Image (tube, coloured by chain):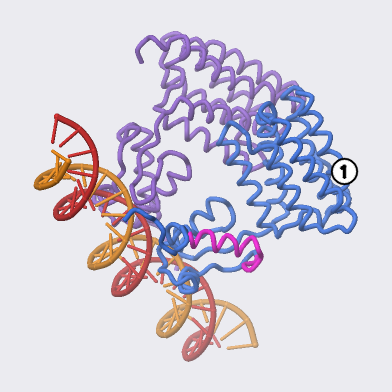
Chain colours: A blue, B purple, C red, D orange
Amino acid sequence: MTDTAVGSAAVGSKSEQAYATVKARIVEGTYTPGYRLVLAKIAEDLGVSVVPVREAIRRLEAEGLVKFERNVGATVSGIDPTEYLYTMQTLSIVEGAATALSAPLIDAGAIARARAVNAEMRECLEHFDPVRFTALNQDFHSVLFEHCPNPHILDLVHRGWNRLASLRASTFRFIPGRAHESVQEHEALLQLIESGADADTIEQAARRHRSATLDAYLAQSNAGSLSAH
Amino acid sequence: MTDTAVGSAAVGSKSEQAYATVKARIVEGTYTPGYRLVLAKIAEDLGVSVVPVREAIRRLEAEGLVKFERNVGATVSGIDPTEYLYTMQTLSIVEGAATALSAPLIDAGAIARARAVNAEMRECLEHFDPVRFTALNQDFHSVLFEHCPNPHILDLVHRGWNRLASLRASTFRFIPGRAHESVQEHEALLQLIESGADADTIEQAARRHRSATLDAYLAQSNAGSLSAH
DNA sequence: GTCATAGTTTTCGTATACGATTTCGTACTT
DNA sequence: AAGTACGAAATCGTATACGAAAACTATGAC
């Protein structure tokens, strides 16, 4: 019979399932950085064998969410401030490129959606909820770069966001001051895109937008002792 | 205690071994694009079981060298011209960034080494050997970006080169005209770095250098679409 | 002659089992 | 008492085995 109707959700393979679950637990904070991921334990927990779990862990390793050491095991990747710096810097580059490449393909509807999100962010500034703000921030940028014609670059952007997500949600918790500027820069970016600005200009703007957040973080955490380059 | 000295070669795990072997065969051309990678067959061939082979294949999938379909199997990734375009475009961006970030850290010695490599390339133009030329080209750029302080970006650059490597060696076989310009642009790039040019300037130059190769390829393949290949 | 369908074969996905390696605890020596 | 060596426990790495899904093939109906 051809009706694929069966009850089981289309979860796909067990290793897929294990991947999704473990990743969710890392992002959500059930598994905190440094937490030791023991294959057998996770396998039992999920009701599967170690083989698919192993595969899931290796995938997470490739994404940088866990660190894996031969014959020793896997641990959830730390939130090294250095790692944060590297990730943000990389993201500023690939996201800038993705936004610039997407710009010509962004229609009025998408612009409107982005503006709506940005309006929510502005509201959010009142009774500031850093987690929500960060989520909206991702939504905003997603609208801008999801049309990126180059899937490789898009993939790199997603990896970057993933990495950040593992840093316990909210960037803006640490640097509330950035939130305000961020909303303004978003509007400026939208106007650039609307006006059909040069690709370089858009790329620069998108890149600066992110690296400004990084700089704010650095200034905050080092009390200004470290300047860029 | 510490006679950890000799004995087993430091080949690492079997899955590592399988990874290296299969990758080598893809790059070297033993497994041509479209080739079907059957786990059991490879496992027997390497004298290991399917489990480590499976892991190796998944790693190669993550790198984009093989395509994997659930319950169907893995095949060597094609040399889709589209893929080539995406890879080159992505590489132009990350390599440009890596070069710009590295530039301040490149000392006179490194510059000299790069010049030496470029000199070899210039020689190579006489009795043109595209494979050798491509290898030297990688050497040249390696000197420039290997000092990149951001390991993530450096990793992205390496991934890009890897992808390219799977396209059967020589880019310059298809666009011999580019080789000449390429050598000149290398020298210009070195002079920019030597003179301590602005990071943006260097990034632009490095990016254009690569995207010019891509453009040449596109022009060639559009113009020559009638001629055999 | 062509299409649909049932059966066979290939190949993957995962469970289980066992050997290998590391780590930790304990007892012994100095 | 401190350091070292030995042994036990934990955990990983890989082999083997079996069930499941897809691809292929052959047979029969129209």
Q: How many marks?
A: 1
Image point 50% across, 73% down: which residue?
A: A45
Residue A41 at x, y = what percent?
A: 49, 73
Picture quadrant where residue B196 is located:
top right
Residue holding disc 1: A181
Q: Is residue A44 magenta?
A: no
Residue A57 at x, y = what percent?
A: 50, 59
Q: Residues within 10 Å of mark 1 (few under 14, many from 20)?
A: few
Residue B97 at x, y = what percent?
A: 67, 32
Compared across the picture, whether B189 is left or right of D8 comes to: right
Picture quadrant where residue A106 is located:
top right
User: Eyeballing the image, is B10 above or below D7?
Assistant: above
Q: Is residue A31 magenta?
A: yes
Camera-nearest residue between A111 and B135:
A111
Residue type of the residue flagged with mark 1: Glu
Camera-nearest residue between A101 and B193:
A101
Residue B173 at x, y = what percent?
A: 42, 16
Camera sees residue B10: no
User: Eyeballing the image, is B135 above or below A222?
Assistant: above
User: Eyeballing the image, is C30 above or below A196?
Assistant: below
Q: What subunit carries mark 1?
A: A
Image point 71% across, 45% down: which residue?
A: A88
Highlighted range, magenta: A17-32
Image point 36% across, 15% down: which residue?
A: B229
Compared across the picture, whether A23 is left or right of B229 comes to: right
Camera sees residue A100: yes
Q: Main secondary structure of the magenta part?
A: helix
| Element on which disc 1 rests | helix
Q: Quadrant of the N terminus of chain B?
A: bottom left
